[in-house]
Amino acid sequence: MLKIYNTLTRQKEPFIPMEEGIVKLYVCGMTTYSDAHIGHARTYVAFDIIRRYLEYKGYKVFYVQNITDIDDKIIKAANEAGMDALEYSAYYARRCLEDMNKLGIKPADLYPKASEHINDMIEMIEKLVEKKFAYVANGDVYFSVEKFRDYGRLSNQKMDEIKAGARIKPEEKKRKPEDFALWKAAKPGEPKWKSPWGYGRPGWHIECSVMSSKYLGMPFDVHGGGADLIFPHHENEIAQAEAAYGRRFVNYWLHSGMLKVEGEKMSKSLGNVILLREALKKWRSDTLRFFFASYHYRSPADFSEEALKNAENSLKRLRVAKEKLEEFAEEGKLNEKELDEVEREYLREIKTAKRKFEEAMDDDFNTPKALESLFDFVKETNKFLMEKEKPNRKLCNHALKEFMRMAHVLTLFQEEKAINEKAIRKIGEKYGIKGEAKEIIEELIEIRKKARKEKNYKVADAIRDELKKAGIELEDMGEETKWRII
């Protein structure tokens, strides 16, 4: 049975969705004022794996991920760029989603934007004011934290601790330092909407309470996000939703661990923020996904050159085993009675690897343990293929399918886009190369490498440009050149 760690109760609990066979999942999306960085990637790969395993277990998952397109940071950046705030955020929203797609993350079912749900937010705020959980102060509206009895439960803080850490900025009109904004009165140079309290815009926290409950109902099954959102964002979400509607907001809260870079916290001040699109230029997307999967989603992860090289080498071992099985695999129904003793033993090992994989994932999505089961599978596969010169092809096909099912949960070996064989062969003919498309690409890379050494950049650039037109992008990584299908 699947058990997941619930941040709210601080323990692993059996997972029981509200509706049989259906899981409703909400994950806090990005505030789109700049490009996505690898910290974002870590979070969204973690929840992609969680979603994939729920689907592996037979659940239909409805996944909602919001886009915050109204925010102080967006407004500030847009003003500096001389752009309309919503146009500015829309530009970065497109780029962020493009980067996540390049990384190989399955899209959410829905990406609601804050700017498209202003009336829904006003409606919830009106309920909170009516129920005296919120108060109006000269065009601003604040949530009165002391009125919500369970405030601090998610972050495991007492009210005295919250009050001690809270501050009031000089321009704020709130009564208590711990109170937070639901609605902000309009300021010059900011986007604004009409409301019962005058023109203004929503606070940050209200959007997720509104959009998650609108599309998933209350309570819904799983709310996720990075651990940095536990307080105050998720704490405030609970307070708003439960105070407004008088019932539980979410059943299970899941939070991914923070990502460090070379042992240091990633921050602008340290100058170590790595944008996802820059990381994708240096590393293959499957290498990055393997790296993220090698950490338990709740654990801190440490991004480094050494860790990525280790991930690349480990992934290569899995890929070689996959290719060996593909060489022998043949479609058809497996008849266990036809197997000899060596083949029956291999079938038992396949079943053992699958059982261990599921046990690991059922234990709060323990991906490092799940990867161990895949490497056990590889070990047994190599042993089997060494012993059997002519293995049962249907058994190899069965092994391949089971291996791929498990690997896909961990986001590995995603379907490759088709190579434009005709275009590649045409380029090959120009340079006197024949063979399979992949072989032609590799030989063209060698010709280009030689041309660059001889400083014949005209030929080197021509090969790169011709391949790009044929849908193949080259990535130079020091002495090595890798290629990928665009």
Image: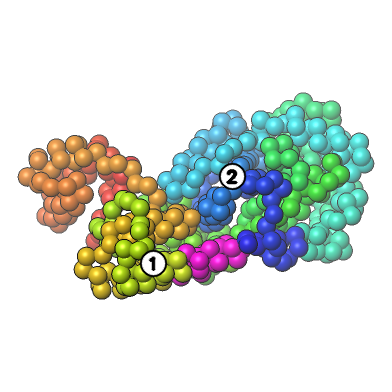
Residue placed most toward the observer, 94 or 189: 94
Residue 274 locus on image (x, y percent): 47, 56
- Magenta stretch: give its range: 354-372
Q: Is residue 426 shown above or below 398?
A: above
Quarter of the image with the C terminus in it: top left
Q: Residue at x 51, y 48 (%)?
A: 36
Secondary structure beneath disc 1?
helix
**Which amino acid lies under the numbered mark 1 shown in the image of this protein?**
Leu
Q: Residues under labels 2 and 1: Cα distance?
A: 30 Å
Residue 116 locus on image (x, y percent): 66, 30
Whether 364 is among the magenta residues is: yes
Labels 2 and 1: the sequence-earlier one: 2
| 344 with respect to 92 (left or right) | left
Q: Residue at x 7, y 45 (%)?
A: 432
Residue 60 circle label: 2
Quarter of the image with the N terminus in it: bottom right
Residue placed most toward the observer, 230 or 188: 230
Residue 347 circle label: 1
Quarter-of-image position of residue 32: top right
Q: Residue at x 13, y 55 (%)?
A: 450
Residue 155 locus on image (x, y percent): 76, 61
| Mark whose residue sits in front, 2 or 1 | 1
